[in-house]
Image (cartoon, grey):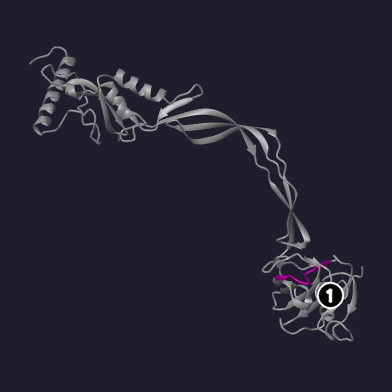
Amino acid sequence: MFFKDPRETVLSRAKARRVKLLAGMSALGLCLTLTALTPAPVSATAVYRTAEAPEESPLVEAVAVTVDGVHAVTVDSRETALALLEEIRRGYETPLTESAAFRERVELLPCLTEPEGVMAPADARALLDPENTASPVALTVLTMAPVTREEAVPFVTETVLIPDQYSDETSVTRSGVDGWAVNTYSVIYENGREELATLTDSRIVTEPVSEIVTQGALPGSRYDSRGVYIWPTTGVLTSKFGSRNISIGSSNHKGIDIGNAAGTPVCAADGGVVIFAGKNGGYGNFVAIQHDNGAVTHYAHMRKILVEVGQRVAQGQQIGEMGRTGTATGNHLHFEILPDGETRVDPVGLLTGELQRY
């Protein structure tokens, strides 16, 4: 056959190749129909046209929508496909939306398919719907919009070290107060749900007030035993350790007595754990403290006990008030030191400094 116009020759040959290709694929039993509601998760298998379909072909021209290279739906035209995609995208836009796009790569490919392979727009819309978690080809809409929020500005904590205190001795000298700021974010949403917010501007409305905390600079705890003993109270040494001539009480004095007014504070001579706190016969209101080196100190005749068994106390911490409970003729503190936890010795030789007389 002879064609005068070369362009007609090219078109005729393209049509002939198309018919031959269709016949060959049919002979191999390949399916050309794009299923409407349950698309196969493979690359688009429709025959993408390079020329018009032959008149005798049972196929119709349509548009296949692919999602990340996988066939999703087939509709009657490019206009229908674009309208569907636009409807889905606009469903997640707001007046503040600056941009909107699909996370997936979406392509519109012209194809030939059997008439029943063309989906109704509503069915195609349902498969592409981002809220359809059962659909393998559901789209993901990413939008970006500016958001302004009033938010707290957390206060910072400043620590001041105190040279003569221990590390667990802390005190808040000024409480912190949060400030306020107006912050603007560029927010990315995925199907309407916030995914990422990037701060783009911040305006401080109220400055935060820093919290100030003092903390000891010495290592260890203030409750640790120091291995030395301080005088447990103030007053006058009224009775020494050892033998004595008295009508009331023991003639072999196992500690020392320090006299002062009722209610005078009584303190722990060293850090340790309270192992007894309560009434103890002639000792009256009595406290025993065991120290980290195994030594024990006793405090007797107190008017009031301020600690309990199991409590950890620090050196110099008040544990009670001076009194005259038990066998006592006046207000005083009876004090004992047992270096090995069992044997009493003269406390005076182990106490540091001088007894403060008040």
**Toward the viewer: 197 or 210?**
210
x 77%, y 68%: residue: 315
Q: Specify start and end residues of the magenta stretch as a single range.
A: 265-273
x 70%, y 65%: residue: 221
Q: Is residue 339 above or below residue 64?
A: below
Q: Quadrant of residue 58?
A: top left
Q: In screen coordinates, is 330 left or right of 191? A: right
Q: Is residue 123 above or below residue 312?
A: above
Question: Which quadrant: the N terminus?
Answer: top left
**Toward the viewer: 125 or 228?**
228
Q: Magenta stretch: residue 266 in it?
A: yes
**Toward the viewer: 283 or 352?**
283
Q: Is residue 242 above or below residue 143?
A: below
In this rendering, the count of numbered labels is: 1
List x then y, in percent, for residue 308. Answer: 70, 67
The kind of residue tagged 1 is Thr
**Toward the viewer: 16 or 326?**
326
Q: Quadrant of residue 148?
A: top right
List x then y, in percent, for residue 215. Answer: 73, 57
List x then y, in percent, for residue 230. Answer: 82, 72
